Amino acid sequence: MTQYIIRRIIQLAFVLVGVSVVVFFTLHVLPGDVAQMLLGDRATTEQVARLRHDLGLDQPIYVQYLRFAADALDGDFGMSLHSAHPAFDDVWYAFPITIQLSIAALFVAVAGGVPLGVLAAVWPLSRFDNTVMTVTLFGVSMPIFWLGLMLILVFGATLDWLPIGNLMPTGMEPPRVTGMSVVDSVLTGRLNLIGLSLYHLVLPACTLGTIPMALITRITRSEMLSMRSQDHVRTARAKGLSEPRVVLKHVLRNALIPVVTVIGLQLGLLLSGAVLTETIFSLPGLGRLLINAILNRDYPVVQAAALLTAFVFVVVNLVVDLSYAYLDPRIRYK
Amino acid sequence: MSTVELTAPSPAPSRPGILRVLRRPTARVGAFIVAAFLLLTVIAPEIAPYDPYDQDFGAALQAPSLDHFFGTDQYGRDELSRVLYGTRTALLSILVADGIALFLGTMLGLIAGFYGKWVDSAAMRLVDVLLAFPYLLLAMIIVAALGPSLFHSMIAIGIVATPVYARVIRGQVLAVRTTEFVLAARAIGGSAGRIMLRHVLPNSFTPILVMATLQAGTVVVETAGLSFLGMGAQPPSPDWGSVLAEGQGYFLTSWWIATFPGLAIFMVVLGFNLLGDALRDHFDPRRRKE
C-alpha cells in the first residue's frame, strides 16, 4: 500500500505541474496581449510596452513560467487588478463558501441517492423502480442553472417557504472564523444562527445536489443489482438469513465500494456546478469570483482560482483512489 | 492489400443492425426528440411567428397568450420565435464543439493507442492534466484567454471534451491493434497511417458513435451554461443560455422568459441521453443481457 501511495503522489506532482503549465500558457500564449487587454484599445504603444515590462511579459516565455511557478508555490499570484488585494487572498476568502455549498450538496446527493438506489434495486422493474429511474434520468438531463431558477420560482417566490439568495440575511452574518456560515455559527456560539444559515443553504444545495443525486441513485441501483447474483449472496440466502440482513450486510456493503468512488468523483461536478449555482443564488463564492475575474480580465485572480480549484480536485481524486485501493486490494496490486 | 481485407476477421462480434436500437421504447422517445429538434433547426424560419430580434416595447413582458404562445421578453421580442431560432445555435454548438472533441480526441486516442510506449504515456499524461480540471473551469479559462463569444465557447467546450474521447478511443485501439487483421496489415508493409485509418479506426466506430451521441446533450448544456454566465453567445442572440440569462432579471415577475428556453435545453439533452443510453446498451453485450 505504501508503494502505491508513493507512486500516486508522484503522479499527482506531475499532474499539478501540468495543470500549472496549462493555466499559465492558456492565459499567456493564446491570442490577445494581456497588457493591451488591461489598458484597452486607446492605450499608446509606449504605455503598452511599459506595462509589458512591468508585468515581465517582455521576458522569454519559459522565464515567465518559471517565475510564475516559483511565486505560485509561495501563494503569490500578484495583486488583483480589480480589488487591489493579493489575488490569493481574494480566492482564499471566497473558497470556504464554495466548499460549504459543495459539502451541503454532496450531503443532499448521498442522503437521497443511496437510499433511493437501494430501494429501486430491492424492487427491480417495479413501479417504484421505474419511477425512480425516470426521475433520475430527468435529473441528469436537467440544466442546473434552469433547475435553480425553477426552485426559486416554486419554493421561494410562489410558496415563500425558503430564502432565494445570499448566505444570510444582511447584518446577521456570524463573525468570520472559517468563512463557512454554518461552521462559524457553531464556533462563535451563535446557535440561533445555525438554523438560519442552514435554511439559506437548502435551495442552493438542492440545486447543486440534484445531478449527483441522480447519478448516485443510478450507480447504487446498478451495483446492487449486479451484486445480488453473486455467489456469496446466494450462500447467505441459503444459510437462511433474512432478506433485510442479506441486502444490508452482503449486497449493500459490497456494492458501496464503487459507489464511494463515484461519490468522491462528484466533487468535480460540484465545483463546476457551484459556479452556476453561486451565480443564481448570489453567493459570494469562488465560482462567482472567478466569473467576475474573467469578465473583468483580472488574470491574477483567474490563475489563483484555477490553480486552487484544480489542486483541490486532484487531491480529492487521489484520496478517493487511495480509499478505493484500501477497500479493494485488487487495485493496489494491478 | 486486398488479401488483408479478404482474410481480415471482424474483431467485433456480429451485432444486430443499428435500427434495432429503436425497439426500445426509451430509444424511440429519444430518437423522436432528437429528430424533432433537428427538424426545428431547419424549419424554424418558416414556423417562427415573429423575427426573433424584432423589438416591440408596447408588447414587453406579456404573459403567454394566443398572440405570443411563450410570451414576450422585456424588449417585447416573441419568446417562441427566440426559442425556435435557439435550436440553430444548439445544433451549431453540437457540430462545432462535439466535432472538435471528436476529431482531436480520436486522433489523440488513435495515436496513443497505436504507437504505445512513450507516445502513449505522453498523450495520457496530457489527458490526465486536462481531466484534472473541473470541466466548466477549464472551459472558462480558455474563454478567458480567447474572449467571450459563442464561437470561443464552442472551441472551449470542444477542447474540454477531447480527453473523454481520447480515453475511449485509446482503449478501443488497444483492443484492436493486436487482432490478426491488423497484424496481417503490418506484415505486408501497410503504413502506420493507413493501418490506423483503414483498419483500426473503422473498428473503433461503435464507441465513437455512442460517445458522440451522449456528448451532444452535454455540449448543449455546457454551451448554454457559458452563455448564461456571459461567456458565450452575447445578447441579442437567441441562444438558449443567453435568453435564460436575460430572463433571470425578470424571473420573479415574468417566469416565462427563462422557463421556455430552459425547458428546450432539458428536452434536447433528455433526447440525446435517451438515445445515447440505448446505443450504449445495444452495443455492449453485457448490458444487452441485463
Image (cartoon, rainbow, N blue to C red):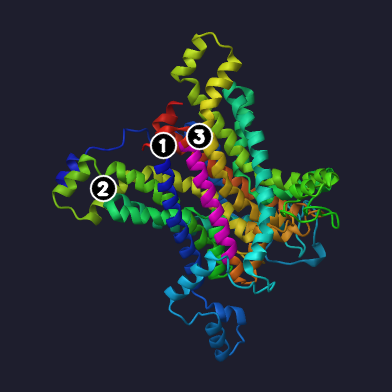
Percent of width and height locating residue A175: 80, 55
**Image mark 2: chain:** B
Left/right placement of residue A33 relative to residue A214 reads left
For mark 3, give the secondary structure.
Answer: helix
Q: What's the CA distance linking mark 1 and mark 3?
A: 12 Å
State the residue in front, A116 or B59.
Answer: A116
Q: Residue at x 45, y 20 (%)?
A: A230
Location of residue A22 with respect to A64 vertically, above or below: above
Give the magenta range: A303-325
Mark 2: few, some, or many residues within 10 Å (few <14, many ≥20)? some
| Residue A306 among magenta residues | yes
| Residue B280 among magenta residues | no
- Disc on res. A258: 3
Q: Is residue A187 visible?
A: yes
Q: Residue at x 62, y 25 (%)?
A: A119
Mark 1: few, some, or many residues within 10 Å (few <14, many ≥20)? some
**Image mark 1: chain:** A
- Nearer-N-terminus badge (1/3): 3
Q: Nearer the viewer, mark 2 or mark 1?
A: 1
Q: Nearer the viewer, mark 1 or mark 3?
A: 1
Task: Give the residue pinned by disc 2.
Answer: B199
Q: Residue at x 29, y 55 (%)?
A: B118
Q: Nearer the viewer, mark 2 or mark 3?
A: 3
Task: Give the residue pinned by disc 1.
Answer: A331
Q: Residue at x 36, y 38 (%)?
A: A334
Percent of width and height locating residue A318: 49, 46
- Disc on res. A230: none
For mark 2, give the secondary structure.
Answer: helix
